[in-house]
Image: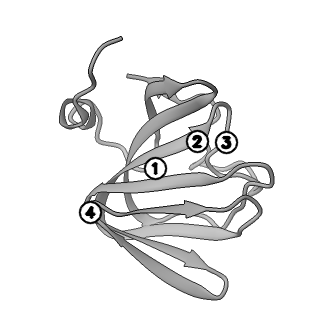
Amino acid sequence: MEKVNLAEKFSTFSEHWTPKIVGTVDDYDIKIAKVEGDFVWHQHEEDDEMFLVIDGRLHMDFRDRRETIEAGEFIVVAKGTEHKPHAAAECRVLLFERRGLINTGDAAAGVLTVTEPERI
């Protein structure tokens, strides 16, 4: 049991859309990621996802609307909900997800798919 300094963890990588595991709570991973540009439309049939914006601005598109999440705010995307995150400029997010969740969900595997996130 050690404290985690998010600023230090974010300083260890520069790539976008590549979540890193920084902690675990029971069967859930706490992940951080730097995001910029568009992600892919996808959904997670069995899992909710939580996105907490640490720095920057994240847009979450749903088929019927767009939500803008600012630093200090979070959004929970309910399981089975199709969504597409994107950020016009680099944004830093903390994710709370069930262990083993694939970041691109039901979308075909591609360059943004991370099946085994690195623990930092």
For discs 3 and 4, the disc positioned in front in the rendered view: 4
The residue where tag 4 is placed is 71
Q: Position of residue 40 (x, y in %)?
A: 61, 64
The residue where tag 3 is placed is 102
Q: Which mark is residue 97?
A: 2
Please report the residue visible at 69 percent of the width from the left and 63 percent of the height from the top. 42
For discs 1 and 2, the disc positioned in front in the rendered view: 2
Going from the N terminus, do you reach mark 4 or mark 2 first?
Answer: 4
Q: Residues within 10 Å of mark 3 (few under 14, many from 20)?
A: some
Amino acid beneath label 2: Glu
Q: Which mark is residue 17?
A: 1
Q: Are marks 3 and 4 in contact (CB under 8 Å)?
A: no
Quadrant where the N terminus is found in the figure? top left
Amino acid beneath label 3: Ile
State how far apart marks 1 and 2 are (Cα).
15 Å
For discs 3 and 2, the disc positioned in front in the rendered view: 2
Q: SS class of the residue under badge 4? A: loop
Going from the N terminus, do you reach mark 3 or mark 4 first?
Answer: 4
Please report the residue visible at 73 percent of the width from the left and 58 percent of the height from the top. 79
Q: Residue furthest top?
A: 1
State how far apart marks 3 and 4 are (Cα).
24 Å
Image mark count: 4
For discs 1 and 4, the disc positioned in front in the rendered view: 4
Going from the N terminus, do you reach mark 3 or mark 1 first?
Answer: 1
State how far apart marks 3 and 1 are (Cα).
12 Å
Amino acid beneath label 1: Trp
Please report the residue visible at 65 percent of the width from the left and 34 percent of the height from the top. 115
Amino acid beneath label 4: Ala
37 displayed left or right of 84: left
State how far apart marks 4 and 2 are (Cα).
19 Å
